Image: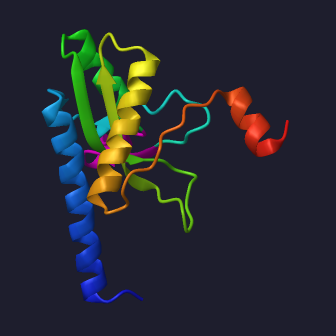
Amino acid sequence: MKSDQDWLSALRWRAGAYQQVRAFFEQRGVLEVETPVLSRGGTTDPQIESLSCLVGTGGNAERRYLRTSPEFFHKRLLAAGVTDLFELAKVFRDGEFGARHNPEFTLLEWYRSGWDHYRLMDEVGELVQCLLNWAGQGHWPVRTLSFAELFVEYAGV
């Protein structure tokens, strides 16, 4: 069992990591957004199970779903003209529970209008390097590999 100091240290570390993510995107002019957690519909992804709850009282209660991702609301913001956005979002997924799976977790999701996947991959590498530097892990080289290259290197296929 963790001591109070261990918990406090972990909470401070997480708060610092969130600050780093926010600073990273703020320096690049990316808007932080906060989107709804409850919606009228669950996920359309057949591989992910939504959690639901009843909202209201008595016979007037209606089923609402906890988001599995902020994607739907982010795309609405993009359609409304918000070009670059990010969110550190609480998300919920049923059917996943264990030592490494929790039904509630924090997901970083961001969008960059007009960017191709190569620019986005570069930005992922820059964000990871920023966090590694902050955590005192120094520089780690970023490699970009295709799926075919990964299969050859790690599966020998």
Quadrant housing residue 63: top left
Give coordinates of residue 88: x percent, y percent: 27, 44
Give coordinates of residue 136: x percent, y percent: 31, 63
Quadrant housing residue 33: top left
Magenta part of the chain:
51-68
Residue drawn at (35%, 54%) of the image: 132
Which quadrant of the rendered structure holds the N terminus?
A: bottom left
Tally of numbered discs:
0
Residue 62 appears in the picture as rendered = no
Give coordinates of residue 112: x percent, y percent: 30, 20
Q: Nearer the viewer, residue 13 or 132?
A: 132
Q: Nearer the viewer, residue 35 or 122?
A: 122
Q: Nearer the viewer, residue 79 or 130?
A: 130
Does the stretch in magenta take in 55? yes
- Give the colour scheme shown: rainbow
Q: Residue furthest right?
A: 157
Q: Is residue 152 left or right of residue 55?
A: right
Residue drawn at (46%, 55%) of the image: 103
Does the stretch in magenta take in 40? no
Which quadrant of the rendered structure holds the C terminus?
A: top right
Residue drawn at (25%, 86%) of the image: 5
Q: Nearer the viewer, residue 99 or 60?
A: 99
Residue 75 appears in the picture as rendered = yes
Give coordinates of residue 50: x percent, y percent: 48, 42
For residue 32, above or below residue 13: above
Residue drawn at (35%, 31%) of the image: 123
